[in-house]
Amino acid sequence: MITVFHGTTKLFKEFRPQDTIGTGEGKSKFGWGTYLTSAFATAVLYSGKGPGREAAGHYVYSVEIPNPVTNESKYFVLHKPVPSQVSSLVEKEIGQIKDRSALEWGNDFRTELETMLFIREYGRKPKGKSEVGTAQKLCADWFYKHGIIGIAWPQGKWPQRGLMMPVENLNVAMFHGSDIHITKVERVEVEFKAKSKNTPDKVTCIEKKNSERITIDIDAL
């Protein structure tokens, strides 16, 4: 198991899609799921995304999940070539993978698979954010059916293709809350700072220096 973090403005006892997915506190750029990170500061940053900028409280959840590095078969890794067992299952169940180059890079394959699943379900390619989200959910459900519990990728700049990320620089998107075990919830004091002097309207959420983190009793919620 490994400890990772989730930033949000909500308090809850368990991770549910309606609380953590598509709410603005972790956009679905890399697929459908609850976004977690190995960096506490990144979790704080995501608590301030979207509506989080106006929220009264900001919380960081410490959670345990199966380690994506030592349990790589449980995750679909976005910056590595696609495992042959996955591509074989796709071609057996869904159809031929037309873009063969996608097999060399997991993130390209993910978007290809999302499109294939949407076409199978609706007879056409997805259009607009809502339908792309539907395609991402179809992909997550397909992965989960075959024993893959989440997506993993490096934080920040990705390393050379084929190299696994270090544990301390990791992001994941988990498909089901049942695979996420909450160990601690802390309220953090935050402030918003401009990313640069030239872009004062673009701000980032950071933890206030020397502020105290307050542990929340989730059993009392």
Image (tube, grey):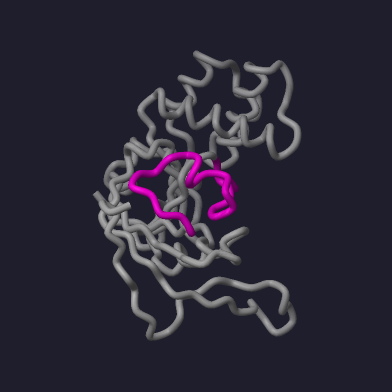
Would you identify the image quadrant in which residue 99 lies?
A: top right
Relative to 192, is 34 on the left or the right? left
Nearer-the-camera pick, 123 or 164: 123
Q: What segment carries the magenta color?
A: 9-31
Q: Give the x, y percent position of residue 181.
A: 28, 46
Would you identify the image quadrant in which residue 110 lies?
A: top right
* Residue at 58 percent of width and 34 percent of height: 136
* Image label count: 0
* Residue at 40 percent of width and 36 percent of height: 176
Nearer-the-camera pick, 160 or 138: 138
The rendered magenta stretch, by its main secondary structure, is classed as loop
* Up/down of 212 relative to 178, above or below: below
Nearer-the-camera pick, 19 or 67: 19
Q: Give the x, y percent position of residue 76.
A: 44, 38
* Residue at 35 percent of width and 44 percent of height: 14
Would you identify the image quadrant in which residue 197 lies?
A: bottom right
Relative to 202, is 216 on the left or the right? left
* Up/down of 1 relative to 133, above or below: below
Q: Give the x, y percent position of residue 216.
A: 31, 62
Nearer-the-camera pick, 58 or 142: 58
The answer to whether residue 105 is seen in the rendering is: no
Magenta residue check for 27: yes
The answer to whether residue 149 is seen in the rendering is: yes
Q: Give the x, y percent position of residue 82.
A: 48, 35
